[in-house]
Image (cartoon, rainbow, N blue to C red):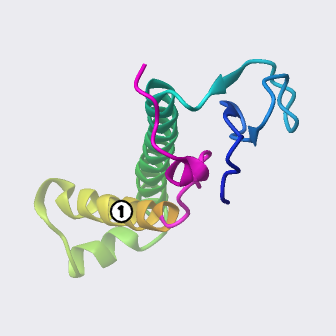
Amino acid sequence: MAAPEATWFACSQCGLLQVEAAACARCRFDQLIDVRRSSVRDLLVETDQRRLDRASGRNRMIGVVTGMVTIGACWFIPGFWKLRAHTIALPFLADQILLMAAVGLGVLNLLDRRVPRTRFPWLETLPPAERY
């Protein structure tokens, strides 16, 4: 999405660029910011990075919980402990911990494929920022 020359105001909530500094046309947020300033552009980049970090942390927690619940549920399947004793039994349930980690890592890899898109894709297309 290429930014028009005279478009200098952006909504920090939805990322819409617009010409006038009234309320946002998309989400009606009433405090638009001036993207001519380099400090504002840095703020927008940091905002996107925080969103990506939150999504990554959430995916990590979902992976850990899924791995633990899946292997914990397997403990109640009849014959699981016999199968474990004949195949991959390691001392101190180390095999169970490894299986939990493997399931969690698999879920994390699946969830990380769906990376949230940036809210401000037009930042790279703007002319150089003013330093004030």
Residue 104 among magenta residues: no
Magenta stretch, residue numbers:
113-132
Q: Main secondary structure of the magenta part?
A: loop
Q: Name the residue at 72% across, 38% down.
A: 14
> At x 36% / y 62%, what residue is drawn?
105
Above or below for 81 versus 72: below
Label count reads 1
Name the spot of residue 103 as percent of width and height, x first.
39, 65
Please indicate whether residue 58 sits to the left or right of residue 94 in the image. Answer: right
Is 87 situated above or below 57?
below
**Which quadrant of the figure contains the C terminus?**
top left
Crowding around mark 1 (Cα neighbors within 10 Å: few <14, some 14 to 19, many 20+) is some
Amino acid type at circle 1 is Leu
Q: Nearer the viewer, residue 71 or 87?
A: 71
16 vs 91, nearest the viewer: 16
On the image, the x and y values in percent for residue 70 come to 47, 60
Residue 34 % position (x, y): 62, 26
* Residue 60, image x, y percentages: 42, 48
Up-down relation of residue 106 to residue 123 (above or below): below
